[in-house]
Amino acid sequence: MKNIIISSMLGLSALCASPANAEYIEPALEKKLVRICYAIRSDSRIKLHVAINKSGIRVKSLAKGYVCNGHDPVTFAALNNANRTGSLMANRLNVDYQALLAKL
């Protein structure tokens, strides 16, 4: 009986001590990705273009899981009233920006 209790306690502690699901991102890459979010929020197409080029990441790659404050880039732009950068990102990512604005 003691063996069952001890093994269940060890199993429970192993589950609680499991690492988080977050992946490590290099600080330099993280800084570049944050700059893209700032460029989207700034509503400057030039700043956005420069930030994406400096990051070395293709726009299509940004569509796959990239988030700014928990939102995809197009939604993030819409929530921050950055219509120029939002429509640019929507065009590049094949998203209907006007339909997205209607939902918000």
Image (spheres, helix red, strand yellow):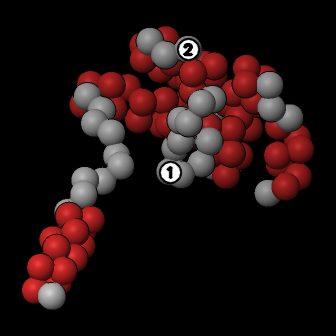
- Note whether residue 44 is visible: no
Q: Is residue 19 left or right of residue 70?
A: left
- Please report whichever mark, 2 or 1, sits nearer to the chain's N-terminal start: 2
At which x and y percent is residue 54? 42, 13
Q: Which mark is residue 58?
A: 2
Residue 61 against residue 4 in the figure, above or below? above
Residue type (three-letter) at the residue carrying disc 1: Asn
Task: Measuring from the top left, give residue 57's x and y in whole percent.
Answer: 49, 16
Q: Could you say which quadrant of the image residue 74 lies in? A: top right
Q: Residue at x 68, y 45 (%)?
A: 75
- Tell which of 78 and 103 is nearer to you: 103
Q: Secondary structure at mark 1?
A: loop
Q: Quadrant of the N terminus?
A: bottom left
Q: Position of residue 41 (x, y in %)?
A: 56, 40
Query: Do the numbered discs 2 and 1 sit on residues whose CB atoms are within 8 Å?
Result: no
Question: Where 76 sits versus 48, above or below?
Answer: below
Query: How far is mark 2 from mark 1, CA to CA?
Result: 20 Å
User: Is residue 85 visible to the viewer in this orientation of the structure?
Assistant: yes
What residue is rendered at 57% in x and 26% in y?
Answer: 62
* The C terminus sits in image quarter: bottom right
Looking at the image, residue 31 sits to the left or right of residue 43; the answer is: left
Q: Is residue 31 left or right of residue 4?
A: right
Q: Which residue is mark 1?
A: 69
Report the residue that reaches farthest toward the front: 1
Q: Amino acid at mark 2?
A: Arg
Q: Secondary structure at mark 2?
A: loop
Write the residue at 71% across / 34% down: 86
